[in-house]
Amino acid sequence: MSPRLHFFRSGRPTTIVSRSSQQVQPPLCLRLAPQRRITANEKPLPKAEQAGPGPNQEQLPHVSEEAAATGKITGEGGPDVEQGTPVQEVLKRDEDSREKAPKVLQEQVQSTSPKGTRPFSTAARPRQEAMISFEDSGVETSGHNFDLPALPLPANMHLKYRYAPIVKQVTNLLMRDGKLSVAQRNMATILNHLRTASPPTFNPDRPLIPGSPPASHLPLNPILYLTLAIDSVAPLLRIRSQRGMAGGGVALQMPVPLAQRQRRRQAVMWILDAASKKPARGSGRGQFAQRVAEELVAIVEGRSAVWDRRGSLHKLAVSARANLNVRGRVR
């Protein structure tokens, strides 16, 4: 049997404290939080003498009024808030609209005319007055590598005219199955090869077009290099077979002159045909463009077979020029 506890007989007094008298300590997060205590040297915050409007209770000015005030301070000039006809004046003239207008506007119409700014306007500043040119605006061009473009802009100042005409034409002829990005990549490979290649050696037996620059200047301008190679082998004529000119259903070959774009197209088709017949020296998606670039260099140096095709076509056109005097039979 456990021994009994005798509180009054123990040598050491025992104190029994009730739970209601125990002090409850706050949590640790509240005890560690810094508390600001006002000392005797500090003064309490001043109280507002008059109870004014609270936050977000004052009506802000209109955007146009605020811009006009800012422009007046900075001296740059803001919007003309006096521009336009106020709604109040419109309602004075139109009784039907005045009856359907809000009560606030009806009270303003009955009172005196609005003073100061005109927040309710039915008109705006015309766009023609807001559009100014570079010369009138006084924009400083200091620090620019190039001057600002002259206004109005020319008709060819467009995104699709950013490439040279011959570059765009050759790119379109290189394109297959509508893959323009592949054709543009091949065109970039061709121009890069012409830029990095060594200066060509001219062949006196294959003269280029008059006015061609020296050979050492061609790699500096790959577009000029490309233009010189294409225009030098471009044919001047084409042969058109016309039936019934000599009677009896016999077809005669008639030489027809070509325009510049037609001449370049025929020359590019010859160059692409000659490049496709060359043996490949490796694998990769840039091999055909590399062969086309080598064919262009061979044309400038007079080593390409495209010169023979051009010469044979011109000989046939010279022999067929007598057929121009033949008139067809009138039925």
Image (spheres, helix red, strand yellow):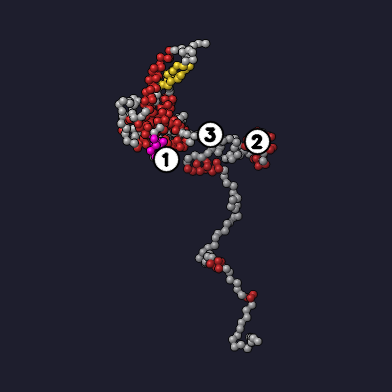
* Residue drawn at the location 48% of the way across and 36% of the way down: 179
Describe the element under mark 2 as helix, strand or loop: helix
Q: Is residue 13 above or below residue 28?
A: below
Q: Nearer the viewer, mark 3 or mark 1?
A: 1
Q: Nearer the viewer, mark 1 or mark 2?
A: 1
Calculate the distance from the C-alpha at mark 3 to the C-alpha at mark 1. Answer: 56 Å
Magenta span has 60?
no
Q: Which mark is residue 314?
A: none
What residue does disc 1 label? 284
Q: Residue furthest top?
A: 330
Calculate the distance from the C-alpha at mark 2 to the C-alpha at mark 3. Answer: 27 Å
Q: Is residue 296 left or right of residue 34?
A: left
Circle 3 residues within 10 Å: few <14, some 14–19, many ≥20: few
**Residue interval drawn in magenta:** 279-291
Describe the element under mark 3 as helix, strand or loop: helix
Circle 1 residues within 10 Å: few <14, some 14–19, many ≥20: few
Calculate the distance from the C-alpha at mark 1 to the C-alpha at mark 2. Answer: 78 Å
